[in-house]
Image: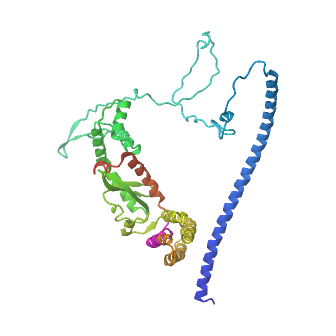
Amino acid sequence: MMTPAEIEQTRREVRRLRIYTSQLKRLQLYHKDKADQLKELLKQKDKQIRELEKEKGKLQEDLEKIKRERDAYKGMVFKSKRTCSNPSSHTTKGRTRGGQLGHKGYGRELPETVDKHIHAHLTNCPNCDSKVLRTDSTDTHTVTDIPHWSLMQPITTEYSIERQWCSNCQKEVRACPVGIIEGSKLGINLLTCILVWKYRFRDPHNKIAERLYTFYKLKVSEGSLVDILKRAKDWLGPLYDKILLEIRQNPVKHADETGWRVGGENWWCWTGVSAKSTYYTIEETRGHDMFEGSKGVLVRDDYAAYEKLSLPQQSCWAHLLRKSHEASVSDNASDEVKNLHKKLKTLFDLLTEDISLPFNQEVRQELYGWYLKDIEKIINTHFECSDTKRIQTRIRNQNVNLLTALLYAGVALTNNAAERAIRPMVVTRKISGGSKTRSGAKPMQ
């Protein structure tokens, strides 16, 4: 009968052996893949060498032939009167321009459908102007083009809307034709195009107005565009609120934030991401309550304000590993922080492997206990070096939030989804510099 101490010691040995076995398996797969790649590369190199040897032999024969011809005609026609002072300046160095030897060419693929067919033929020869006969032999050439903007004129439709009377409601009623926005003198396609240019292509108002006039001869002032965007806020606001509600109720959601300038003041742009939705909001403070009343798990970075939310949270391992990597590769990095970084990478690899397996609550609970001991051991270790203590403090602040993904299905270890979602707003901020007014900072709210 084993004592509890012996059982605990055995478990620790099993844990260390599991980690070591996992490392050996990864190392074996890495070297196997590397060997296969090198073997394939060697085959390709051997083939290239054989081809080059053949080409070399052919070039040598051609060179000898040219030399014989040169010697035969030397001094008969061409007499060199000048010599280059720097022959090496004419020598080709490095990679030549254009297609390389063995390079596979690529061209535009043929379209799946053809909208129009045109048959072209000649009646007279373009060289001598003689008459030419018709044939049944043809070549095909496919061209994809867009209509000239002078042909893309807007379509103006006049609707005759009856003024009708409802005897039940005791008031006048009118029909709203399909495909138009009530009260708007601009069509829905034009309004959609303006929204796409503004928010998808990040065009400023003056460029949108210029494009409308250039393409469609429509004169729309910048003030009118601002009014259109404000009206779009009223039309789409309720739908946008539903996106936020969907994210709040989703079992797994991601969050991130970045700075945003509004009228010269520092504001914040927040994003919430679920499996099928992305929500943006620009707020005056960094302590926004976008996730108040949310359900499920929140995956987030190390920003401390998230700790006030009363829902399970998963801290981003990518942020932690990036900080430990930066500390381990700095000029004055200590051996302690290098070892700690290696240990964190090992834990992350094992966690990634474990959460990729089918979800089983009992198994995940047991794994959670083992990983929690590893985290607590790092937190309780007495480190001497300041760079290691800084990483230890980050781990202490996150603590169990680093392991939440083990307890819930479908939770990622990193916040990459929100990082990718906030990137378009960062590009927009770089182009526009932010928002001029408070109302302009909230176009959909």
Colour logic: rainbow
Q: Is residue 171 left or right of residue 84?
A: left
Q: Nearer the viewer, residue 79 or 264?
A: 79
Percent position of residue 154, x then y: 35, 30
Image position of 14 (left or right of 398): right
- Whether residue 217 is visible here, answered yes or no, is yes
Picture coordinates of residue 193 (x, y %)? 38, 39
What is the magenta range? 392-409
Kindly identify the residue that appears in the image at 55 percent across and 35 percent down. Answer: 111
From this view, report whether residue 14 is shown above or below residue 273: below
- Occupied quadrant, residue 32: bottom right
Is 84 left or right of 305, judged from the image as shown?
A: right
- At a point 62% along the width and 82% down the height, the residue shown is 10
Residue 400 magenta-highlighted? yes
Quadrant for the N terminus, please: bottom right
- Residue 2 in the image: above or below residue 157: below
